[in-house]
Amino acid sequence: YSKDIDNLFMAGRCFSATHVGLGSPRVMHTTTQMGVVTGYAAAVCIENNCTPRDVYKYHLDTMRERLNKIKSGAEFKH
């Protein structure tokens, strides 16, 4: 989330990192996952009428549960 703007998420390569820290995020799969997580966080904001910062403060367990479902493939089973 943005430190200055209440209702703003950022995803992709628009973040600050050292040359060492940029090693992993510049890979396409990692960058794609940033977008996925941002989308899930936006859904949590809508469902709970909260700001992006509130997701981290109050709804982190919800995010973890949803992301674990993706990791296990539970959302994609027929």
Image (cartoon, grey):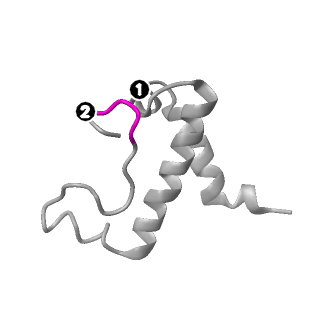
Please give the name of the residue rendered at 80% of the width and 62% of the height, measured from the top-left corner: 77
Along the viewing direction, whichever of 23 and 40 lies nearer the viewer? 40
Element type at marker 1? helix
Residue that lies at the very extreme toward the right in this rendered image = 78
The alpha-carbon separation of the residues under discs 1 and 2 comes to 16 Å
| Circle 1 or circle 2, nearest the eye | 2
Please give the name of the residue rendered at 41% of the width and 26% of the height, measured from the top-left corner: 57
Q: In screen coordinates, is 40 left or right of 23?
A: right
On the image, the x and y values in percent for residue 2 come to 30, 39
On the image, the x and y values in percent for residue 63 come to 54, 40
On the image, the x and y values in percent for residue 68 come to 60, 50
Q: Residues within 10 Å of mark 2 (few under 14, many from 20)?
A: few
On the image, the x and y values in percent for residue 40 come to 56, 46
Q: Residues within 10 Å of mark 1 (few under 14, many from 20)?
A: few
Question: Which kind of residue does numbered mark 2 sit on?
Answer: Asp
Determine the main secondary structure of the stretch shown in magenta. loop
Residue stretch in magenta: 4-8
Quarter of the image holding residue 52? top left
Q: Is residue 33 magenta?
A: no
The residue labelled by disc 2 is 4
Residue that lies at the very extreme toward the bottom in this rendered image = 28
Quarter of the image holding residue 7? top left
Label of residue 5 in the image = none
Element type at marker 2? loop
Label of residue 57 in the image = 1
Q: Mark 1 near mark 2, Cβ–Cβ under 8 Å?
A: no
Sequence order check, earlier mark of 1 and 2: 2
Please give the name of the residue rendered at 22% of the width and 67% of the height, measured from the top-left corner: 22
Q: Is residue 62 above or below residue 39?
A: above
Question: Which kind of residue does numbered mark 1 sit on?
Answer: Lys
Q: Can you say which quadrant of the picture contains the N terminus?
A: top left
